[in-house]
Image: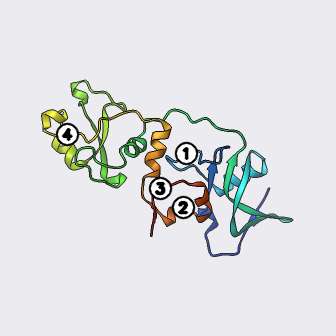
Amino acid sequence: MDCGIRERTSDNINGLRTLVLNANMQPLSYAPLSVWDWQTAFVAVHQERVVQIKTYDDVEVHSATASFEVPAVVALKNFHKRKQVGFTRYNLFLRDEFRCQYCGERFAVKDLTFDHVVPRSKGGGSNWHNIVACCSKDNLRKANRTPKQAGMKLLREPYEPDVWQLDAAARRQPLTKTSLHNSWMDFLYWDTELEG
């Protein structure tokens, strides 16, 4: 289908995203939040792979003969069972809630690194149970030692989170109004107030 874009607002349609819900009307994932670009969601709706729940106000796309609303929220038709959490840098930082596990301060992702609790040179592995989020200062201070050898203490022992623990950590993160569209709010169960 060759669609053109007609906007009735000044919003940039190319930046629009669509919230993807599971069949139980909960986000497919919170960590990271399950979103598609609007084009992928639009095609999925018209191929009847998902159900369109909400559309963006005052934004539509059109072909030569028809106009179509742009999906803001879609839901899968069949329930998608969540899988094991991937061992990634982002998921590790999210598990530790973007806090250095030595000093407890919160950092932006770009200012965090990770630390092998038991250094690799001492037989420590690169896995959920041996790596924590760490600020550069504490990483340098600890160096190639265990926390005990460095006179440091972990805030919490590292662990392998399940999908529900990671989602809970994601819901506790501060959100900004620009990161979420108003049409999504009925489907997100965040305990945190939006910041301006």
Circle 2 sits in a helix, a strand or a loop, which is it? loop
Residue found at the far right of this picture: 65
Instruction: Classify 10 Å Cα crowding around label 1: few (below 14), some (14-19), many (20 and above).
Output: some
Q: Nearer the viewer, mark 4 or mark 2?
A: 4
C-alpha span from label 4 to label 1:
32 Å
User: Are circles 4 and 1 on residues that touch, CB within 8 Å?
Assistant: no
Residue drawn at (13%, 37%) of the image: 150
Q: Residue at x 29, y 35 (%)?
A: 157
Side of 181 where 119 appears, left or right: left
User: Is label 3 in a helix, a strand or a loop?
Assistant: loop
According to the image, label 1 marks what residue? Answer: 29
The reply to whether discs 4 and 3 touch (Cβ–Cβ < 8 Å) is no
In this view, the residue in front, 19 or 14, is 19
Above or below, comparing residue 34 to residue 85 in the picture: below
- Dot 1 or dot 3, earlier in sequence: 1
- The image shows a total of numbered marks equal to 4
Q: Earlier in the sequence, mark 4 or mark 3?
A: 4
Q: Position of residue 27 (x, y in %)?
A: 59, 48
Q: Could you say which is closer to the camera, residue 44 or residue 63?
A: 44
Please report contact status of discs 3 and 2: CB closer than 8 Å, yes or no: no
Q: Residue at x 61, y 62 (%)?
A: 16
Q: Amino acid at mark 4?
A: Lys
Kind of residue sitting beneath label 1: Ser
What mark, if any, has residue 191 been given in the picture?
3
Give the amino acid type for the residue marked by disc 2 in the picture.
Leu
Question: Percent x, y for residue 184?
Answer: 60, 59
Circle nearer the viewer, 4 or 3: 3
